[in-house]
Amino acid sequence: MQILVTTFQDIEAARERIKGAVYYSPCQASIPLSELTGMEIFCKLDNLQRTGSFKERGARNALAQLPPDQQQRGVIAASAGNHAQALAYQGKLLGVPATVVMPMFAPLIKVSNCQKLGATVIMHGKDFGEAKAHAHQIGEERGLAYIDGYDDPAIIAGQGTMGIEIVEQVPDLDAVVVPVGGGGLLAGVALAVKSLRPQAKVIAVEADHVASFSAALREGKPTRITTQPTLADGLAIPQVGLNAFEIAKDLVDRCVVVSEEQIAVSILRIVELEKGVVEGSAATPLAACLSGQLPELAGKKVVLLLCGGNIDPNVLSRVIERGLVADGRLCRFTAVISDRPGGLADLTSQIASTGASIKQVVHDRAFAGSDISAVHVLCTVETRNHQHLAEVRERLSSHGVKTFDSK
């Protein structure tokens, strides 16, 4: 396969091409995230785009360059959601019919939004690779142009417009932290930032369940990996793009990998501290800063790409709860108490006396063991942190109540 390397001039041309059709998103300082990380944090808010992600940049640039006859026939793409929505929306504005093939795991909200935006949605494949193969097949049969969501040179150039905006908005930035899945955003932003401010560091961050860029760096070329389910579904690409990798590999200063728990906690931090809603992919830059892997950025001006906000509300609810558990703010344990009048009241009284809030209690008499005078009580409790939970359990122990962890 021939490598088609995007240039900075391509990014500049893309910027003129998308002007007026893609939102010039804010890149604002965040006092709470700065205090949390020990860095001077700025957030590039591309989650505020019309379709909720940066993907509109590349989609508009690619669609606008198609020959008129191809625009009339239409385009097709495989996408877990954001590229699909961007193609649907920008295609609608330009009058270009869009068909998208989405893997079966694609978030329901993204499927629904694509349909609302007028795209023809086809659900196919257990992973992105199978969806992509099916999309190519349909494209050949129907004469539709396939628009690669991360490796098309026009897509990479479009995504790079975010890098130009970032340098305009924070001209003295020290580093930019960029999520990486297929590599299109990373390649475009890295090329733009390094062209305009060569001394700035470009940090790539990926989820450990879908670490295809790390694999490519180790092998020196794009390498197919086995992905696992991840909160960062937008990064779930089994092999980084060839063109994207060729650009990014020499421009990226560091690549860090974050865990699912770190992503969940970062989504919660952005909700609580930044008052923003982001999907897992867009939370990975903050996760990288909180992971302890970037001590060299302490006190530096760091731009985080909050590049997508399309998270399923049901998933968001579960993620927030998972984040609260990781924080020690939502806890569950089993207490063994006497099965006598007042036993439960005494338990709840002791918990309340520590300042903890009881969210739920469940009696378990049938499986409480051989002691028929005892009962197990499954307690879900809201606490301030892990230390507060330890104080709750210590208080109960001092009153003769045995507790143990519950899964």
Image (tube, rainbow, N blue to C red):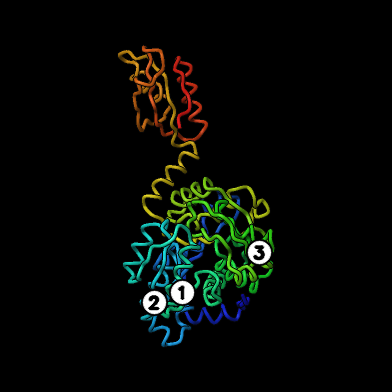
Which badge, 3 or 1, is on the more N-terminal residue? 1
Q: Nearer the viewer, mark 2 or mark 3?
A: 2
Can residue 318 be seen here? The reply is: yes
**Quadrant of the snapshot with the C terminus:** top left
Q: Residue at x 63, y 76 (%)?
A: 3
Can residue 302 be seen here? The reply is: no
Q: Residues within 10 Å of mark 3 (few under 14, many from 20)?
A: some
Q: Secondary structure at mark 1?
A: helix
Q: Quadrant of residue 104?
A: bottom left
Residue 4 at x, y percent in the picture = 61, 77
Residue 126 at x, y percent in the picture = 45, 57
Q: Residues within 10 Å of mark 2 (few under 14, many from 20)?
A: many
Number of marks in picture: 3
Q: Residue at x 48, y 74 (%)?
A: 147
Q: Amino acid at mark 3?
A: Val
Q: Nearer the viewer, mark 3 or mark 1?
A: 1
- Looking at the rendered structure, which numbered label has been put on residue 59? 1
Q: Residues within 10 Å of mark 1 (few under 14, many from 20)?
A: many
Residue 89 vertical position relative to residue 349 in the rendered view, above or below: below
**Quadrant of the snapshot with the N terminus:** bottom right
Please give the residue where the numbered disc 2 appears in the rendered image: 91
Work out how far the residue at label 3 is from the one at label 1, CA to CA, in angstroms: 24 Å
Q: Quadrant of residue 401?
A: top left
Work out how far the residue at label 2 is from the one at label 1, CA to CA, in angstroms: 8 Å
Work out how far the residue at label 2 is from the one at label 3, CA to CA, in angstroms: 32 Å
Q: Secondary structure at mark 2?
A: helix
Q: Amino acid at mark 1?
A: Ala
Q: Given contact means CB atoms under 8 Å apart, are the residues at marks 2 and 1 in contact?
A: yes
Residue 201 at x, y percent in the picture = 66, 63
Residue 37 at x, y percent in the picture = 58, 50
- Looking at the rendered structure, which numbered label has been put on residue 252? 3
